[in-house]
Image (tube, rainbow, N blue to C red):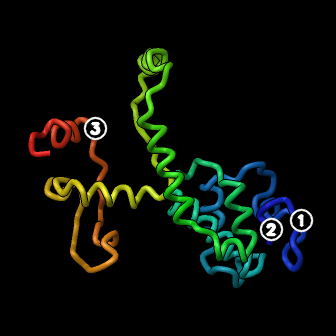
Amino acid sequence: MTLTPEADEGGLPGDGAEVYFPGKDKIELADLYSFISSRPHGTTSSFAGSDDDALKLATLYFVESVLMGKRKNRNVSEQIMKIIDDDALCASFNWGSLAYETLLKLLKSCLKSNENDVEKEKEKEKEKDIDSYTLVGFPFAFCVWIMEVLPIFQEKQFVNFKEAGYPRMLCYSEMKSPQFDALCRKYFHNEKV
């Protein structure tokens, strides 16, 4: 199968992305999820492609949604499609470094002050937008790190932690999404923290 425009020998001819997502210039993560979840029996009777095609599509979804932490309305990376298309490259690729570098780059850009902050503040007041950040690049690891460094999150019932051995990441369940004002009250304005 070829997810990218170059054809490969032994797989589907032409553009595999066009075969599975006809008429789409860019594939969103939601499109990929819908395609995979609409085939409950895997590749047996509900999937026209090969097992290799199904594995590549599932790998693409896993990398984009879990490792990179993308939202469903974001486009699938063509760079990642090319890496997954090449079996040897995909097997040897350092996915952890890619996720870490992406997360680090995003954290640096979120915290960097901008020269146009005054203009942005005026625009936000007009639009009444809520400030938020979207973490990509395996944000689960970052969230677990926060839970480990600030155990008060566990004490205040924002997460459930049950010691179950290693990896410790699997000991956390039901991470709730607290509102900003609750975080300010309980953490940022708390003398214990």
Amino acid on which disc 2 is placed: Thr
Measure the alpha-carbon separation of dots 3 and 1.
Answer: 49 Å
Q: Which residue is mark 1?
A: 14
Q: Which residue is mark 3?
A: 180
Sequence-wise, the earlier of marks 3 and 1 is 1
| Label 2 secondary element | loop
**Residue 1: x percent and y percent?**
80, 72
Measure the alpha-carbon separation of dots 3 and 2.
Answer: 44 Å
| Label 1 secondary element | loop
Q: Which residue lies at the image location 90% right of the left edge and 70% below the top edge?
A: 13
Q: Which mark is residue 2?
A: 2
**Residue 104: x percent and y percent?**
47, 49
Q: Quadrant of the C terminus?
A: top left
Q: Which residue lies at the image location 78% right of the left edge and 76% below the top edge?
A: 48
Residue 150 quadrant = bottom left
Total labels: the figure holds 3
